[in-house]
Image: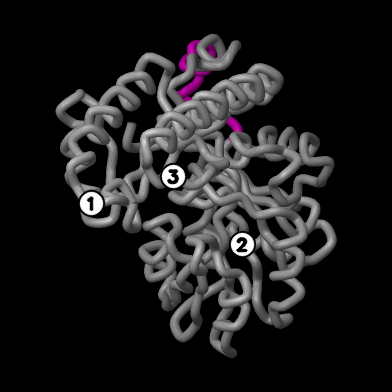
Amino acid sequence: MALNENHWPMLPGVHEALVESLGSVNRTGDALAARLEGRLAAELGSTADRVVAGAGSGALLQQFLSAHCGPGSEVLHTWPSFDLYPLLIRNAGAEPVAVPGDSRGGQDLDALAAAVTDRTRVVLVCNPNNPTGEVLGTGELTALLAALPAHVLLLVDEAYREFADPAAIADAVGLSTKDRRVAVVRTFSKSHGLIGLRVGYLTGAEELVAPLRRTSPFHRVPTVAQAAALAALDADARMREQCREVAAERDRVRRGLTELGFDVPPSGGNYLWVRLGPRNQEFIAHLASYGVAVREVAGGVRVSTGLPHANDVVLAAARAFATLAAPHAEGALR
């Protein structure tokens, strides 16, 4: 439960599509995933020139940063956030600038805007934020965008969007149709359960998307991944139902942990971020003794949401840990 994987069953039709696609892996086929891009554009109510498919959101983030940044430029991101952002930014030759969160542990968008310089090319925001789970609304992203100068692009990473409350999370794709500086990246890895196949997409204005196509031949979506993604799109209703089930389990575990005294902020992803300060590693080792693997991320312990029986084990282990912590000073779990 350390990798934010989707533990729910494969979506209907995906297995069959994979099997059928195996018969054509010796052929080039739809090398640049034009059919998938067209389908995604239709789903978004957009056009194919505004959508590019890639080998997962990580590859697309790298392509975008490499296309729009370079030596001498800066990329701003909030912190805590996805711990690979600095690596991706440096891979593009740019300098990562981490902007600390506010006193409540949330993303400080005012500070983010204030940190912009003449060298800033991209502001990168994760929504829902990994690992904290924070969800930003449309008003917050709109205000951030208004505070950014014209030379700065806003890149929104929505890897976990489908696990959040649709009424609460920002409509970043909608913003991208109104402001040509906004790009949005999404993935099939989490909500659609295709992490082993590596497929995602990025959408935005044509002038933001087109430069990524220069490297698309080297970050291709494999034939089998295209087939699985198209089948997963056909199973949209079941995908969303599964995401609601994951979210319900996530919230059940959070309630159990908070009732035991753990400090766990609300989450819109398929994970929780448990803040134990100096006791993080002790908690990780304790969960490991129950057969549960989790990891420390940005000063907290990130616990992915598993199937109900696995979540029950997490709660049982946490209950035992809370008992161990009881003799310590008040606030030992915080």
Nearest to the observer: residue 263 or residue 129? 263
Q: What residue range appears in magenta?
A: 19-30
Please report whichever mark, 1 or 3, sits nearer to the chain's N-terminal start.
3
The dot on residue 264 is: 3
Q: CA distance from mark 3 to mark 2?
A: 27 Å
Q: Find numbered disc 3 in the image and state the secondary structure of the residue it sits on.
A: loop
The dot on residue 205 is: none
The dot on residue 329 is: 1
Image coordinates of residue 17 in percent, x first then y, are 56, 15
Q: Looking at numbered disc 2 in the image, what kind of residue is underneath it? A: Leu
User: Which residue lies at the image location 26% right of the left edge and 49% below the top edge?
Assistant: 332
**Mark 2, residue position:** 155
Q: Looking at numbered disc 1 in the image, what kind of residue is underneath it? A: Ala
Q: Callout 2: few (<14), some (14-19), or many (20+) C-alpha neighbours within 10 Å?
A: many
In the displayed structure, does residue 93 sit left or right of residue 128? Answer: left
Badge nearest the viewer, 1 or 3 = 1
Q: Callout 3: few (<14), some (14-19), or many (20+) C-alpha neighbours within 10 Å?
A: many
Answer whether residue 28 is visible to the viewer in this image.
no
